[in-house]
Image: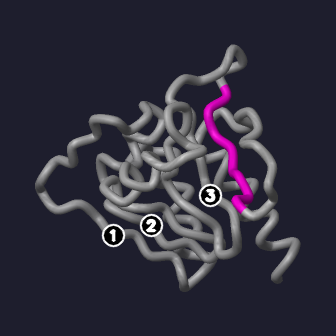
Amino acid sequence: MGQRIEAYINNLKKKYDTVEIVICNSRKQNLKGVPDPLHELYETALAVELPFGRIFTVDAALEQSKNNPFTPNWFVFGQDNYFSFWLCSYSPDKEGLSFTYWDHESGNDIDEAVWPDLESFLQELEEEYIETTI
């Protein structure tokens, strides 16, 4: 994993006993179809369980991303413990933003990306988790 995201997830493992990272074996994952901002994560981790949600395996994420309303703009790489999917755009917007989440029960369209990288996205989700559950 990228050093920053790896350090962040390792910090989560120290704070919460429910964090689990499924590490890749020696085989390289085929990341064709995965947006660039998620390559560092998927180069090491097959999947990640967090106290506030989960990051899917590449295969599960690719399969989920084929569904409407995600195709063709969004890659669904995880979900929270309620109703929201975690999304990464295939192309960052003009401001370099790539990440957002979408509540599939809201009936709303998917909004624009809000976060530039996975670390800032996960930090926001963790802060919401702490505010609502701890």
Outermost residue, right side: 131
Q: Pointer 1: what residue?
A: 22
Q: Name which of mark 1 and mark 2 comes first in the sequence.
A: 1
Q: Is residue 103 magenta?
A: yes
Q: Position of residue 75 (x, y in %)?
A: 50, 42
State yes or no: discs 1 and 2 in contact (Cβ < 8 Å): yes
Q: Name which of mark 3 and mark 1 comes first in the sequence.
A: 1
92 vs 37, left or right, is: right
Q: Dot 1, how many residues are within 10 Å of its Cα: few (below 14), some (14-19), or many (20+)? A: few
Q: Secondary structure at mark 2?
A: strand
Tell which of 90 and 5 is nearer to you.
90
Q: Dot 2, how many residues are within 10 Å of its Cα: few (below 14), some (14-19), or many (20+)? A: some
Residue that appears at 48% across and 61% down: 55
Q: Which residues are magenta?
A: 97-104
Residue 43 is marked as none
Q: Position of residue 1 (x, y in %)?
A: 38, 48
Q: Dot 3, how many residues are within 10 Å of its Cα: few (below 14), some (14-19), or many (20+)? A: many
Asked if 22 appears above or below 61 in the picture, the reply is below
Q: Position of residue 40 (x, y in %)?
A: 39, 41
Q: Pointer 2: what residue?
A: 48
Residue that appears at 37% across and 60% down: 60
115 vs 17, left or right, is: right
Amino acid type shown at disc 2 = Val
Amino acid type shown at disc 3 = Phe
Q: Secondary structure at mark 3?
A: strand
Q: Nearer the viewer, mark 3 or mark 1?
A: 3
Q: Secondary structure at mark 1?
A: strand
Residue that appears at 55% across and 46% down: 68
